[in-house]
């Protein structure tokens, strides 16, 4: 992030095959900071959205997706349709989401802290898994995460 004349310039994260949950959080926060998130998630039903904001949001989303995907969604003229299309493509239907959650749970269960790893680094890994699960609509309980932390620590820490 670069500060310039009292405003912020944000670096746009490009969507990949594996980063959708993190990408969605970052893009949403940047769009919200620029006042264009309302083109995707309207505060009131039937509320008219400024055409300039619609164009800005659409341009922003096209900037945040890989070039090979631009032509696939070029026919969408509304940012909400682009957003929903990407969400469906990367999170998919319920069974795809369920498979992603199962993978995350297995990753959590198999995660082990290395001898040379700091507690902070390991907690960051756990938090990242929890955020990914939350982005898929599943909330990992804090007690489960704490248990995972304690179970995963090397004997030398205990």
Image: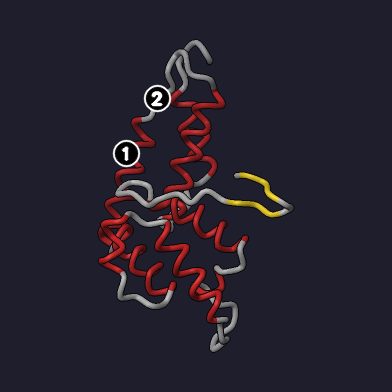
| Residue occupying the point 30% across, 69% down | 73
Within 10 Å of the Cα at label 1, are there few (<14), some (14-19), or many (20+) other Cα atoms? few
Where is residue 1, by image quadrant?
top right
Residue that sits furthest to the top in the current view: 156
Specify whether 57 is left or right of 8.
Answer: left
- Colour treatment of the image: secondary structure
User: What is the residue that sits farthest to the right in this orientation?
Assistant: 6
Q: Is residue 76 above or below residue 16?
A: below
Task: Point out residue 8 in the picture as x, y percentages from the top left corner.
Answer: 65, 52
Q: Position of residue 88 (x, y in %)?
A: 32, 65
Kindly give the residue lying farthest to the front in the view shown.
5
* Residue 52 falls in image quadrant: bottom right
How far separated are the C-alphas under marks 1 and 2?
A: 12 Å
- What residue is at 30 percent from the left and 49 percent from the top? 17
Quick one: label 1 or label 2, which is nearer the N terminus? 1
Residue for badge 1 = 106
Secondary structure found at label 2: loop
Instruction: Compare residues 42 and 108 and report the one nearer the observer.
Output: 42
Above or below, 117 against 95 in this view is: above
> Of 154 and 63, which appears nearest the observer?
63
Residue 8 lies left or right of residue 96; in this view the side is right
75 w.r.t. 91: above or below: below
User: Could you tell me residue 106's position as x and y percent?
Assistant: 32, 39
Q: Residue at x 54, y 43 (%)?
A: 142
Residue 38: % across, % down = 56, 73
Q: Residue at x 38, y 78 (%)?
A: 77
Q: Secondary structure at mark 1?
A: helix
Residue 86 higher or lower than 138, as above or below: below
Within 10 angstroms of label 2, few (less than 14), some, or many (20 or more) residues? some
Question: Which is nearer the eye, 109 or 134?
Answer: 134
Where residue 112 is drawn, which disc sits there? 2
């Amino acid at each position: 992030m670069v500060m310039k004349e009292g405003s912020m310039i944000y670096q746009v994260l490009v969507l990949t095959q594996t980063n959708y949950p993190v990408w969605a959080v970052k893009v949403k926060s940047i769009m919200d900071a620029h006042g264009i998130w309302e083109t995707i998630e309207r505060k009131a039903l039937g509320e008219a959205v400024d055409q300039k904001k619609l164009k800005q949001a659409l341009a922003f989303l096209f900037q945040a997706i890989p070039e090979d995907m631009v032509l696939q969604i070029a026919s969408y003229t509304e940012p909400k349709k682009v957003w929903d299309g990407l969400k469906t493509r990367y999170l998919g239907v319920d069974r795809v989401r369920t498979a992603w959650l199962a993978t995350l749970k297995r990753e959590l269960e198999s995660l082990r802290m290395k001898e040379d790893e700091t507690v902070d680094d390991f907690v960051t890994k756990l938090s990242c898994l929890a955020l990914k699960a939350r982005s898929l609509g599943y909330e990992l309980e804090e007690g489960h995460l704490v248990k995972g932390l304690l179970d995963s620590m090397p004997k030398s820490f205990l």
